[in-house]
Amino acid sequence: MKNNLDTLVTGGRGLVGSSLSGDINRVGSEFDLRDKVVTDKLFSDLSPKNVIHCAARVGGLGGNMNHKGEFFYDNIMMNTNVIESCRIHNVKKLVCFLSTCVFPNDVEYPLTEKKIHLGPPHNTNDSYSYAKRMAEVQIRAYREQYGLNYVTVIPSNIYGPNDNFDLANGHVVPSLIHKCYLAKKNNTPFKIWGSGKPLREFIFSKDVGKLTEWVLDNYEGEEPLILSTSDEVSIKDVVNLIVKHMSFDGEVIWESDKPDGQFRKPSDNSKLLSYLPDFKFTSLDEGLKETIDWFIDNYENCRK
């Protein structure tokens, strides 16, 4: 990756931003990217040549279901302002992060880059999903009208150090890690929403960091690029690994009356591997151990 301060990373102190190497400008929640004036001033002051847009209003199943209006507004405004500021301030390369949530609920598997707009997303996170889809639409429109080298990537479920471990608004892995930690600390049962049967693909944040650096320097495709391992694992298997690495020996309770969310959304990473056939992904077991160790060591100061 270009090793200089010409690269701006929004959400730069979060999960993906903290995994990027090099001397780059990382900005976080101190800049309200929903505000067009604030965003424009940020770009004017820093004059970045490259932008990696990771900032987003994110959350788990509960957050997505209970704050749909906020999730839609916040993400639409952040994405629109960042992309437009990139255009106005002559940013040469933009890498914008989407999510596997953008894919339709009812679609033939595996998910590929061509299937984003083939139907509505799952209703549990449709507001967030549509906002992310519109970022892809805006970037595609800007490429066509202005000839800009702006690209999008679609990572599967990212986990790792520096995540948001908030119980209500964190993604599945950090929320489960925090729940297990508290259950062990308080000698209480480890309670988990749903049946544990849904399948997900997880990718370690440090792997995403390496792939993002490659995308910034090399990928210029009009279509998004899926960043995934294409290896499915059940939520129950994830919980078992967390229990192992947390050395939790208490009761695990599955609250099957709570929603599971979308059952599975397997992706096809063949396009990624056509560019990087020898890329070595971190195993889930290894990545979870590193994440849990980091969480325990940084419990007092991490986002939670």
Image (cartoon, rainbow, N blue to C red):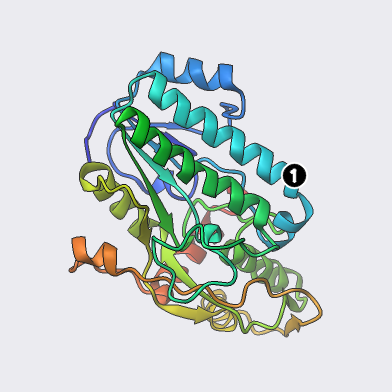
Give 258 or 96, whichever is nearer the viewer. 96
Residue 113 visible from this viewpoint: yes
Please name the residue shown 33% across and 68% down the image. Answer: 269
Horizontal relation, residue 128 to residue 9: left or right: right
The amino acid sitting under disc 1 is Gly
Horizontal relation, residue 140 to residue 215: left or right: right
Q: Residue furthest right?
A: 257
Residue 37 position, x and y percent, is 57, 16
Residue carrying label 1: 69
Please name the residue shown 59% across and 45% down the image. Answer: 131
Answer with the quarter of the image where residue 199 lies.
bottom right
Is residue 121 positioned above or below 72 on the image?
below
Please name the residue shown 43% across and 49% down the image. Answer: 16
Give 284 or 299, whichever is nearer the viewer. 284
Horizontal relation, residue 218 to residue 161: left or right: left
Residue 300 visible from this viewpoint: no
Residue 190 position, x and y percent, is 72, 77
Could you classify mark 1 by the number of other residues whose Cα lies within 10 Å: few (under 14), some (14-19), or many (20 or more)?
few
Is residue 173 positioned above or below 303 on the image?
below
Residue 221 position, x and y percent, is 27, 48
Q: Secondary structure at mark 1?
A: helix
Give 88 or 115, whichever is nearer the viewer. 115
Please name the residue shown 76% across and 79% down the image. Answer: 189
